[in-house]
């Protein structure tokens, strides 16, 4: 009888892990509960749903996130291949039509003869070869079993989602298309504010009512900080963040004091999300404040922003750089529950877990991805960070090993990239991912 791998969760990491296993002729039982019971962040029945932004961040190879995507392309990542296909204009970022992206991944996985889709809630950690990729909103029953397995409380932070508005409800007599410094196509819609308008809006924002959070302490991820929390850090915080006006002047006019940007959210250009406006304001306050923004006076809000809890294991004490648990060789974690942060990072963890699980099933030696790569440096970080104060982080050049050769500061990123791709090529040609 052929060994079967259980993949629990068909999010970004689980979908990628299932694909990597199936392409290596490993049979997979892919479990997904969302068609039976959705969590607070889910909207679609499709797999690999992008619940927050529709952007996979920078596609510039000199950015660590862009480098990670290029590495994933060279490793035949299903999710990055589909993301490239469903790309929507977003300057130097890789943003996608979220429904088209998730729908195609679902169809590909359902059509794969090596993948058996099971719509069921898993309440116990299965025996046998298993990858848990249940995401940051793992069901309470399974969370309890994971806590019992690890012998420690699950860690968490809060993440926030930005609102989406209907394009036809945007007043384009006020708003205008432009990318910062006119780089690339004019991909963003810009809503300009004068200082007087910003002052009034800012004062309303900092006293606006937020949704109640049950936990005593609100711990938020710095990379997805609610805009009202940013505002409370100071009058200028938003002006140097998501509302930065530099490079967004309308032709023939002076620079606005502040600018609210909207990014295309689907291929047919009917929906736009408000960039950087992830929030946990009440729905009524979101509507009031969004409609105070010039150009959005009659905005039809298709999806309101919400805040949700991200739960994850204490990675350094739980898993190694293969994403394999230290207590049980046939059990792996992948995705945000494993302690990584971000869409691309979750995909990468699923790819590594899937490749290594296939090796385990076939009785081969597991492989560590080169630490000089974005994928390898992330795996090394989560396995070797301090377990006393572990927190997820996005991929960044700060967790790469230092460059040994002498170089000028402006050459550093280019050298990181060249070294990473050279090491990855050696890794691939060495037969490590067969």
Image (tube, rainbow, N blue to C red):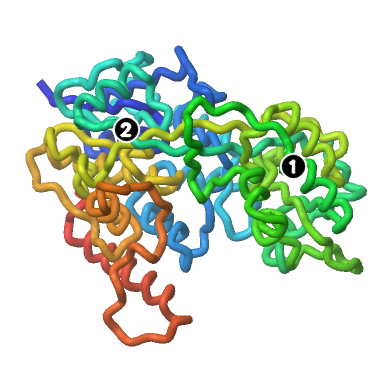
Q: Report the residue marked by disc 2.
A: 154
Q: Is residue 372 left or right of residue 227?
A: left
Image point (42%, 52%), residue name? 394
Image point (28%, 50%), residue name? 382
Q: Is residue 55 above or below residue 157?
A: below
Q: What numbered label is drawn on residue 205?
A: 1
Farthest residue toward the left?
Answer: 363
- Residue 309 x %, y %: 47, 32
Dots 1, 2 in contact, CB < 8 A: no
Q: What is the crowding at mark 1: few (fewer than 14 residues within 10 Å), some, or many (at least 20)?
A: many
Quarter where residue 283 is shown = top right
- Residue 371 x %, y %: 25, 62
How many labels, in total? 2
Q: Give the Cα separation between the discs numbered 1 and 2.
A: 33 Å
| Numbered disc 2: secondary structure | loop
First reached walking from the N terminus: tag 1 or tag 2? 2
Q: Is residue 64 left or right of residue 389?
A: right
């Amino acid at each position: 009888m052929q060994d079967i791998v259980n993949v629990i969760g068909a999010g970004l990491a689980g979908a990628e892990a299932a694909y990597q296993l199936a392409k290596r002729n490993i049979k997979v039982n892919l479990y997904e509960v969302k068609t039976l019971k959705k969590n607070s962040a889910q909207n679609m029945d499709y797999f690999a749903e992008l619940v927050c932004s529709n952007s996979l961040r920078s596609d510039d190879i000199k950015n660590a996130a862009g480098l990670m995507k290029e590495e994933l392309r060279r490793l035949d990542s299903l999710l990055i291949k589909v993301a490239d296909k469903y790309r929507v204009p977003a300057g130097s970022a890789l943003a996608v039509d979220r429904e088209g992206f998730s729908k195609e991944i679902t169809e590909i996985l359902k059509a794969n003869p090596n993948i058996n889709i099971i719509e069921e809630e898993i309440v116990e950690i299965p025996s046998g070869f298993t990858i848990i990729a249940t995401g940051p909103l793992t069901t309470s029953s399974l969370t309890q079993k994971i806590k019992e397995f690890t012998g420690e409380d699950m860690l968490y932070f809060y993440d926030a989602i930005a609102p989406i508005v209907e394009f036809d409800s945007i007043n384009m007599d006020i708003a205008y298309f432009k990318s910062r410094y006119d780089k690339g196509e004019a991909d963003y819609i810009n809503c300009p504010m004068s200082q007087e308008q910003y002052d009034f809006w800012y004062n309303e924002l900092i006293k606006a009512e937020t949704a109640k959070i049950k936990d005593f302490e609100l711990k938020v991820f710095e990379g997805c900080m609610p805009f009202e929390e940013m505002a409370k850090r100071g009058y200028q915080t938003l002006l140097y963040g998501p509302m930065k006006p530099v490079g967004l002047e309308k032709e023939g006019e002076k620079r606005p004091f502040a600018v609210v940007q909207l990014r295309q959210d689907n291929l047919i250009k009917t929906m736009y999300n408000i960039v950087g406006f992830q929030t946990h304001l009440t729905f009524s306050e979101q509507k009031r404040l969004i409609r105070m923004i010039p150009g959005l006076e009659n905005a039809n809000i298709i999806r309101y922003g919400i805040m949700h809890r991200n739960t994850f294991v204490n990675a350094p004490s739980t898993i190694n750089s293969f994403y394999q648990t230290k207590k049980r060789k046939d059990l792996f974690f992948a995705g945000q529950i494993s302690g990584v942060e971000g869409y691309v990072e979750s995909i990468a963890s699923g790819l590594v877990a899937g490749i290594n699980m296939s090796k385990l099933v076939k009785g081969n030696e597991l492989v560590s991805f080169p630490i000089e790569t974005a994928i390898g440096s992330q795996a090394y970080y989560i396995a070797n960070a301090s377990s006393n104060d572990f927190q997820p982080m996005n991929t960044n050049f700060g967790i790469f090993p230092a460059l040994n050769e002498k170089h000028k500061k402006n050459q550093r990123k280019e050298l990181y990239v060249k070294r990473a791709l050279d090491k990855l090529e050696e890794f691939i040609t060495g037969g490590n991912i067969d």
